[in-house]
Amino acid sequence: MESTRQVLDQFEGLVKQDLDNLEARLEKLKAQQGLEVFPLNGQMLEKSVSLATEVELKPFDNSILAAILVRADDLRNKGETDLAFCELDGDLQPWDKNGNAKPALTRLYDDARVWVYGDFTLSRPEPRDDW
């Protein structure tokens, strides 16, 4: 019982340390060139609600997808055309573990003209010829 308590205390300490460092980590991220950290806005929250009937995702993933789609629309309206989303989480990738398309996610990303990469090297999968 004592060893279990020690492990839990250590785990609790790590969680508290991570939370204490969260603000500094976010500020460091915001300072990175080419990276924009933005909060969910009302339009993103509305999109999240409407997406709940289109795709089966966990609430957090649903919010991320809504943010990506709304932000992509904002960027396209500002003239941006080369939009990509790098995602390691299989829940938000528009393909399954066997590489088969997930129709609902594929349609949402295609409609938003957002290419999804399964890595952060922007190499896999390569954009289609018609992209």
Image (tube, rainbow, N blue to C red):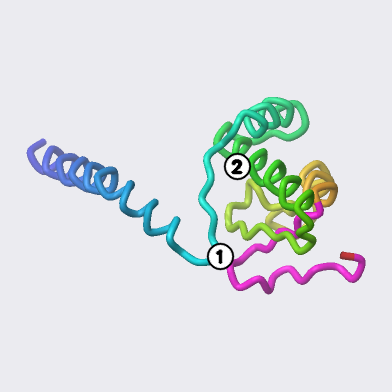
**Is residue 121 within the magenta segment?**
yes
Return the x and y of residue 26 as percentages of the image width and height.
39, 51
**In the rendered view, does 3 fall on the left or right side of 79?**
left
Residue drawn at (76%, 59%) of the image: 80
What residue is pinned by disc 1? 34
Quarter of the rendering containing residue 16: top left
Query: What amino acid does circle 2 point to?
Result: Ile
What residue is pinned by disc 2? 64
Residue drawn at (73%, 27%) of the image: 50
Other residues around mark 2 within 10 Å, as few (<14) / some (14–19) / many (≥20): some
- Indicate which disc residue 3 carries: none
Quarter of the rendering containing residue 29: bottom left
Residue 91 drawn above or below residue 97: above
**In the rendered view, does 127 fall on the left or right side of 34?**
right
Return the x and y of residue 3 as percentages of the image width and height.
11, 43
Q: Main secondary structure of the magenta part?
A: loop
SS at mark 1?
A: loop
